[in-house]
Image: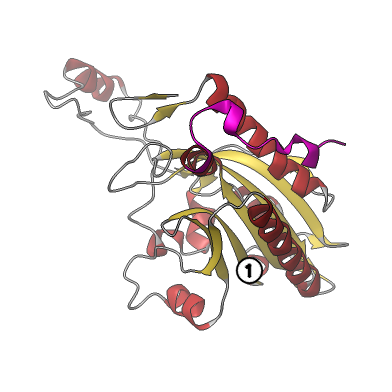
């Protein structure tokens, strides 16, 4: 593993293999629910995120892909002096921004189901690069760009609750088996202006989110019950009603950190949980 000057990480060798093994474990758990593997673009429609009030709730974390307005005069002005002495882009006029870099892996799943009437509860899993603006960076623990694996259940309320309960039991068994110091703790998302944000208030009132907290300080994943919010926003229905949904999210780099921190840097000391995913 290498750390760049801006505190991002480059995984290679045994550490990259560890990350791949961990993700195979997540995929194995997802397969147990019959989840369909999907791959999505890391670009998410600004208009669709706006429906979720994302920019009201997380303006401090949003990151956008920006391009220059394509007229020659504007491009020439930029090319004349593109970078400041501090190493920052000196942008001229930009094109309209209609996409956001994905802050979470699962948003494209709900968006892709807009207007659908589901015949049965659906299970989906995907891995995606995600992007969030962080005030401070720490390799593997807190990065602007990171990899998230999610397993999503969408459909009947009872199915979603059972999915989340089963996954909780799977995780508790795994952490206990390897004596990993991870606790499932009730949590809220890092909303902007929490005093007036209704979604923050809802999470405080009802236990909608639980985080997998390693060693008392680092959230390496989460279990999330969305109720029927995505079903209502994107008009996804099951048996005539807005679907319920829930997801289990894993930060792969943070899991790598937890393994390195707890088991040490030597590959021979890392747990061999391949038997859990064989077959």
| Quarter that holds the N terminus | top left
Answer left or right for 228 relative to 14. Answer: right
Quadrant holding the C terminus = top right
Q: Residue at x 55, y 68 (%)?
A: 209
- The boundaries of the magenta stretch are 262-279
Q: Locate residue 144, reporting x and y percent.
A: 39, 40
Question: What residue is drawn where x is 11% and y is 23%?
Answer: 85
- The local secondary structure at tag 1 comes to strand
Rendering quarter of residue 137 = top left
Q: Is residue 235 visible?
A: no
Identify which residue, 84 or 153, lies in the foreground: 153
In this image, 194 relative to 82: left or right?
A: right
Tag 1 residue: 225
From the viewer's side, name the closer residue of 102 and 176.
176
Above-or-below relation of 278 to 134: above
Q: Look at the picture and state if 6 lies above or below 214.
A: above
Against 118, residue 271 (above or below) is above
Direction from residue 158 to residue 74 in the image, left or right: left
Does the magenta segment cover residue 270?
A: yes
- The location of residue 195, given as percent across then percent down, is 32, 78
**How many numbered discs?**
1
Residue at x-position 41% and y-position 57%: 217
* Quadrant in which residue 58 is drawn: bottom left
């Amino acid at each position: 593993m290498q750390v760049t000057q801006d505190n991002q990480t480059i995984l290679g060798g045994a550490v990259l293999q560890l990350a791949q093994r961990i993700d195979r474990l997540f995929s194995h758990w997802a397969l147990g629910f019959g989840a369909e593997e999907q791959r999505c673009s890391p670009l998410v429609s600004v208009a669709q995120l706006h429906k979720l009030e994302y920019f009201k709730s997380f303006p401090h974390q949003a990151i956008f892909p920006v391009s220059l307005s394509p007229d020659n005069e504007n491009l020439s002005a930029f090319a004349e002096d593109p970078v400041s002495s501090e190493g920052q882009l000196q942008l001229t006029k930009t094109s309209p921004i209609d996409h956001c870099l994905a802050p979470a892996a699962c948003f494209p799943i709900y968006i892709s189901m807009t207007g659908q009437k589901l015949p049965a509860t659906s299970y989906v899993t995907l891995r995606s690069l995600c992007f969030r603006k962080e005030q401070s960076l720490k390799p593997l623990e807190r990065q602007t760009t990171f990899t998230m694996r999610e397993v999503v259940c969408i459909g009947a309320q009872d199915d979603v609750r059972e999915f989340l309960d089963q996954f909780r039991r799977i995780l508790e068994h795994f952490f206990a088996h390897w004596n990993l110091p991870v606790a499932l703790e009730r949590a809220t998302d890092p909303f902007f202006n929490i005093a007036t944000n209704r979604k923050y208030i809802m999470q405080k009132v009802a236990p909608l989110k639980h985080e997998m907290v390693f060693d008392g300080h680092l959230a390496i994943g989460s279990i999330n019950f969305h109720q029927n919010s995505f079903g209502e926003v994107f008009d996804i229905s099951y048996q005539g009603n807005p679907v319920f949904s829930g997801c289990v999210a894993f930060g792969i780099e943070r899991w790598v950190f937890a393994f390195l921190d707890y088991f040490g840097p030597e590959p021979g000391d890392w747990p061999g949980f391949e038997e859990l995913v064989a077959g």
